[in-house]
Image (cartoon, helix red, strand yellow):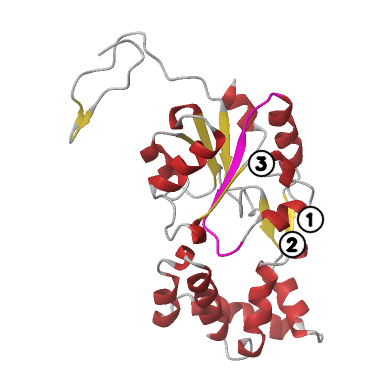
Amino acid sequence: MTAGTAPVMGPEGPIRPAVDGAGPRPLRAVLFDFSGTLFQVASYADRIRAASQVPVPDEELEALLDGLEAGLDDPDVAAAQHARDVSAEAHRHAFLTWYASVPALAPFAGALYEQLRTPAHWLPYADARPVLEELAARGVPMGVVSDVGWDLRPTFAAHGLDGFFTAWVHSCDHATEKPDPYLFRHACGLLGVGPEETLMVGDNPAKDGGAVGAGLRAYVLPVAAGGTAPGSRRGLDAVPRLLG
């Protein structure tokens, strides 16, 4: 094994240890997740009020939100979430099934789903643009890898953030979901960089952290105290520091 060559892994670990002095390659590119990483969708309270198009008393709204939470335990809803991001059809079915599990929301299920595809209902985190600008100024290639059921480019474009990215990988276009190594490696190929030179940034340890299995390095954003409200800071300023 020559210096700088990654060890061949066996079932319990490397067959041979890494050569002394052989460290990881410098990071040259960054892949970002979408929801919960760069953008956050408007609250369900706001979206229900918008979909209903009539005033919704606070007490009634709380009951609807409780119904959505309870719906996640519905066997039909849970079944619909399985592999929901492998196609646009599966994604739509998963969300419509969930929304319709609350009888009072069933008439608005379609409208609630279309909100997900509408750029106005998404807001970038406050630190998204500054971090993307800094990485772009340093010449860092960037891409988006997202488990999603629609094309994200119009949402990024509506907020003036699409120009930072040269690779777009939507799970629904590839009939698979993260952490399938194919999605991460495909994005690296679009950027023209090796997985070992690429950082995946996301908010899901299993999905985004799974990029490690494809040979990338991963940074999973910490859970923010009090949640991650739309328009708040997400802690993305750590990303440029990770690149050195």
What separation in Å lies between label 1 and label 2 (alpha carbons)?
6 Å
Say which label, 1 or 2, has the lower sequence index.
2
Magenta segment's dominant SS is loop
Q: Give the range drawn in magenta.
A: 138-150
Left or right of residue 106, residue 155 in this image: right
Question: Which residue is rendered at x = 62% and y = 49% of the image?
Answer: 225
Looking at the image, can residue 56 be seen?
no
Q: Identify the secondary structure beneath mark 1.
A: helix
Kindly identify which residue carries mark 3.
165
Q: Identify the secondary structure beneath mark 2.
A: helix
Give the residue type at disc 2: Pro
Kindly identify which residue carries mark 2.
119
What separation in Å lies between label 1 and label 3 (alpha carbons)?
14 Å
Q: Identify the secondary structure beneath mark 3.
A: loop
What separation in Å lies between label 3 and label 2 (alpha carbons)?
17 Å
Question: Which residue is rendered at x = 61% and y = 51% of the image?
Answer: 34
Q: In this view, does 106 lie above or below 226?
A: below
Say which label, 1 or 3, has the lower sequence index.
1
